[in-house]
Amino acid sequence: MRILFISQYFPPEMGAPATRTYQLCKAWVQSGHDVTVLTAFPHHPTGIVPPYYRRKFILREKVKSISLMRTYVYATANKGFLKRTLSYISFMLSAVFFSPFIRCNPQVVIATSPQFFVAIAGYLISRLKRRPFVFEVRDLWPESIVAVGALKNPWLIGVLSKIAHFLYVRASLIVAVAESTREILAARGIPRNKIEVVPNGIDTGLFFRQHDAKSVRRQYGLDGKFVVSYIGTHGMAHALQSVLTTAVLLRQFEDIHFLFVGEGAERDDLLRRRDVEGLENVTFLGQQDHEMVPLFLKASDVSLVPLRDEALFSAVLPSKIFEIMAASRPIILSVRGEAKALVERAQAGLCIEPENPEMMKDAILKLCENRQLGKTLGRRGKRFVEAHYSRTELAARYAQVLRGVLKTVSQ
């Protein structure tokens, strides 16, 4: 198949959207598909474009046989609703404007959230090229930004909701990552038979190889510590202030240390609080290349998957769950709904209430005092993810779904 995949984010950017797109498209290329990714110049989450990419409106690249076409984006840090919205709109417009210069002749156009301005671009480009439009729904918009308090204007929420519904209706296929998303959309009148679920997965080749975790511990002064890590976006949805409160509750335990790896809208506030409260049991590292994620996970004794206590997040299945499992590390999950059900089914971690520092403290102490339990949970998680969530196998399933769309359209 010839696939055009539209995503605002792509490596060298760190973060789940960029990583998912890269790993999925790489798996497709390795299976013989012709894949072109239409994306923005790297800038997320710092808002800083690397020197090589500056002062350009369009750039073609080749990454692992994936053809890339990067187009202009208003680069801004991942903070501030207005600036981020302008960034989303700028990529939407530039993607549509430069789409005639895409060298491939795609059979299908896929656009991925988490923000649906990309999906608007995908729909318009699919109409220009007269190809079926596939809407990959990673997060529900505008519900996600409403849930974290970033959008409160009722009129604007209504307008964005109508646009989202228009895209759901017009898509030839909707690909969701969680069963809960399918149920939510079906309850809104979207035909169930046009919604497929292809969950997140992991690159087994990256996570199952040997990693020298001891070097990370030595480098950051973590030798002899029970390391509790959070690795990912430091965003408004992730309830990281609650995690810091847990660090306050555990500050008297000198062998327990918190490691935060990543960037995001909340990072500066978290850093200020750490310094003001003198939390010597907390280390913050900035954005790291995704190739380093398995190393940091292997250097951890337990890794956290927190989200805010919002009903919408019961339908979220964070990709970091699968990465932690693949690294054979236990999870402390503070998310309700489908994510909790999956971790419990895998028997790969401890599940607690969202935004509950006391429960998180107790879970950390339980694993710290019973290291064998953590090893057992980690082994179970690795076996589970290897059996059910290989990115290569999921990419093959996704491709089969796309073939079904093309067959339906051609009839």
Image (cartoon, rainbow, N blue to C red):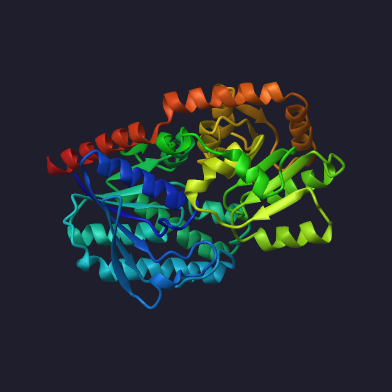
Q: Is residue 370 left or right of residue 59?
A: right
Q: Is residue 376 left or right of residue 368?
A: left
When the figure is inspected, residue 281 is found, relative to residue 13, above or below; the finding is: above
Give coordinates of residue 20: x percent, y percent. Answer: 42, 46
Give residue 247's quadrant in the image.
top right
Give residue 183's quadrant in the image.
top left
Residue farthest along the bottom direction in this orientation: 55
Give coordinates of residue 12: x percent, y percent. Answer: 43, 58
When the figure is inspected, residue 294 is found, relative to residue 47, above or below; the finding is: above
Say which quadrant the C terminus sits in. top left
Q: Residue drawn at (58%, 56%), measured in percent from left and top?
A: 146
Give coordinates of residue 117: x percent, y percent. Answer: 41, 61
Please say whether residue 260 is visible from this viewpoint. Answer: yes
Give coordinates of residue 293: x percent, y percent. Answer: 53, 45
Please say whether residue 346 is visible from this viewpoint. Answer: no
Q: Is residue 88 left or right of residue 68?
A: right
Residue farthest along the right direction in this orientation: 252
Q: Is residue 184 left or right of residue 312?
A: left
Q: Residue drawn at (53%, 65%), measured in percent from left and top?
A: 155
Say which quadrant the N terminus sits in. top left
Give residue 175's quadrant in the image.
top left
392 or 88: nearer the viewer: 392
Q: Residue drawn at (56%, 23%), measured in percent from left and top?
A: 379
Task: Report the number of discs.
Answer: 0
When the figure is inspected, residue 314 is found, relative to residue 138, above or below; the finding is: above
9 or 67: nearer the viewer: 67
401 or 303: nearer the viewer: 303
